[in-house]
Amino acid sequence: MIRSFVFSQKEGRLISQDIGYDLLAVLLKDEGVQFWVDIGEASDEEALAILDNVFHFHPLAIEDCLAPSDRPKVDEYEDHIFLVIHSVELDEKQRDFNANELDMFVGQNFLVTYHRKPLKSIAMTMEKIAKNPHSVARAPDRLVYTILDFLLDNYTPLVSHFSQRIADVEANVLERGSDEIFDEIMRLKSLILKLTQICWPQREMLTRLARGEVKLIRPHMLPYYRDLLDQLVRITTQAETYRNALTDIMQVHLNLQQTQINRIIKVLTVLATLSMPILIITSFYGMNFQHWPTLDHSTLEAYLWVFGVTAVMTVGLYWFMRRKGWW
């Protein structure tokens, strides 16, 4: 679906929506208007009709736009810049998140966005335009800021989701150490690593925008872009903190597992030690001799003698281990 919005250059007033391709080409030369074209869930042919035939963007930028990329970037061309950034969408049912690419072409009086899947940041920006276009559409760099602001706001539910899951794991690991806890820790570490790999390159891109290294970002808009950078830095810092917390939880889990194993080994060792007297005595009486002390007595007396000696030795070993604190 292709949407378009035309605004007056001075007031930022919404003039028209969803105009034809031919009119877009004409308005592109009109310095009195600015517009935003959003290409969402469109075929490559439909996208090319806008990107190449109407705007005549650089072929390399168009190629990068139509080919999925997992690397954020900002490229400057003669009359426009090309941005690649990624949004995140929390999938609570799958306990996962999806990273969706958003491409932007920014010029003096236009913004063109391209995405293959519906994005909340785009939908929220359109809702804001419907309510108060003047606050959004005074210039393309402000419109870009609005979209990026909504895009980064959508990271918050994901970060909160991770925080809750880590708290649950932390509570459960002290109650019970199981393979399920280990699997959950590894899943969370994998997801947070995935988030970190998305955030770090985007920090580099936003740093360029916030420092004024891109000519189409006006000086008075730089504080707004620095605020976006600060927001992304906080998200990245939180992700790193969560990774470290999971590493600590993993260590606690492994220590608890090792402690449990040591307890089991201790019990087995004590049982094996306590069984030594009966093993020693029975091994003696298992030897092939015709005459052996106590065997000349009655069977009852022999049993009592053997059991008595065994019991005394076993109790003695038990008392010795208790005194040493081994049991």
Image: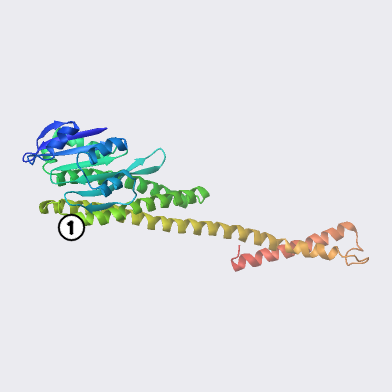
Q: Give x and y (percent) for residue 245.
A: 38, 56
- Of residue 132 and residue 37, the one placed in the foreground of this image is 37
Can you say which quadrant of the picture contains the C terminus? bottom right
**Quick one: which residue is furthest to the right in this view?**
290
Q: Give x and y (percent) for residue 149.
A: 21, 45
The quadrant holding residue 318 is bottom right
- Indicate the amino acid at tag 1: Glu
- Of residue 90 and residue 291, the one placed in the foreground of this image is 90
Residue occupied by mark 1: 213
Q: Does residue 233 appear anywhere in the picture?
A: no
- Of residue 152 and residue 250, the one placed in the foreground of this image is 152
Look at the numbered disc 1 and give the secondary structure of its residue: loop
Q: Does residue 168 appear anywhere in the picture?
A: yes
**Residue drawn at the location 89% of the way across and 57% of the way down:** 299
**Relative to 187, residue 276 above or below:** below
Can you say which quadrant of the picture contains the N terminus? top left
Name the side, left or right, on which 275 lies relative to 173: right
**Residue drawn at the location 27% of the way across and 49% of the way down:** 60
